[in-house]
Image (spheres, rainbow, N blue to C red):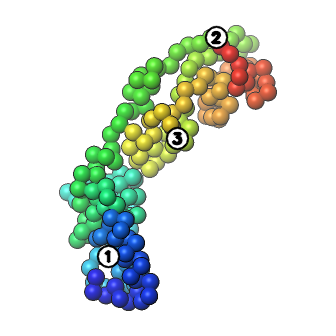
């Protein structure tokens, strides 16, 4: 922290704000990284270590861990950045785990067949399905988010096949071709259709 004074007027408020957030080691890193000083751990090192996935003990970090570590070190969640490595203070368990999508569906009653619709291109099965409304499965995979964050009552919605098709293009493509023209907000099969 010796050279933090090079930040001038802004150094004290920046250090205080970051330290209050719980990331003492990271506040030093970020303020020194902004100032371009050469002592201690630097903000650029913090960001690079987070992006490349460096982690104490050679473990690979998840996207959530990298994000929390970059934003504020420990942030009260038990992650800190010391001597060029991230140290686990109990946050890894919090940032992982939860039910897989299959386990969550089973615990919420699973999928159930509601009806069958005869079409020119075959029978369309209508069932209760589950849709990731806010955090999609693709987002979860891309950013390595924990299962508990993606598979919960707020994010996973129970819908019927028609409702699911209206809000999810990837589900709509699997409808029978003969029923697709009848599926729309004001079509024969819409959000309020009962099965």
Q: Is residue 112 above or below residue 81?
A: above
**Where is residue 82 drawn, in percent x and y?**
24, 68
- Total labels drawn: 3
Residue 28 marker: 1
Report the residue marked by disc 3.
136
Q: Tell me which residue sits at (37%, 75%) in the image.
A: 16
Q: Tell me which residue sits at (28%, 71%) in the image.
A: 25
Lower sequence index among marks 3 and 1: 1
Q: Residues within 10 Å of mark 2 (few under 14, many from 20)?
A: few
Q: Disc 3, disc 1: CB below 8 Å?
A: no
Residue 85 is left or right of residue 62, and the answer is: left
Q: Is residue 72 above or below residue 189?
A: below
**Where is residue 20 drawn, in percent x and y?**
35, 68
Alpha carbon separation for disc pair 1 and 2: 63 Å
Alpha carbon separation for disc pair 3 and 1: 36 Å
Q: Secondary structure at mark 1?
A: helix
The answer to which quarter of the image holds residue 166 is: top right
Report the residue marked by disc 2.
116
Q: Is residue 53 above or below residue 172?
A: below
**Where is residue 177 drawn, in percent x and y?**
71, 22
């Amino acid at each position: 922290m010796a050279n933090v004074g090079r930040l001038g007027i802004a150094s004290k408020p920046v250090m205080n704000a970051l330290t209050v957030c719980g990331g003492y080691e990271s506040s030093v890193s970020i303020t020194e990284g902004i100032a371009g000083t050469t002592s201690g751990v630097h903000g650029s090192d913090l960001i690079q270590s987070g992006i490349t996935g460096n982690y104490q003990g050679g473990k690979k970090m998840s996207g959530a861990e990298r994000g929390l570590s970059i934003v504020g070190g420990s942030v009260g969640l038990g992650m800190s950045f010391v001597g060029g490595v991230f140290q686990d203070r109990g946050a890894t368990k919090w940032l992982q785990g939860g039910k897989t999508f299959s386990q969550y569906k089973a615990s919420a009653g699973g999928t159930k067949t509601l009806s069958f619709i005869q079409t020119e291109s075959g029978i369309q099965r209508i069932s209760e399905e589950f849709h990731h409304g806010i955090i999609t499965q693709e987002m979860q995979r891309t950013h390595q988010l924990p299962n508990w964050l993606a598979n919960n009552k707020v994010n996973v919605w129970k819908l019927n096949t028609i409702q699911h098709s209206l809000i999810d293009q990837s589900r709509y493509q699997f409808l029978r071709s003969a029923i697709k023209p009848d599926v729309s907000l004001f079509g024969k099969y819409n959000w309020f259709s009962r099965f």
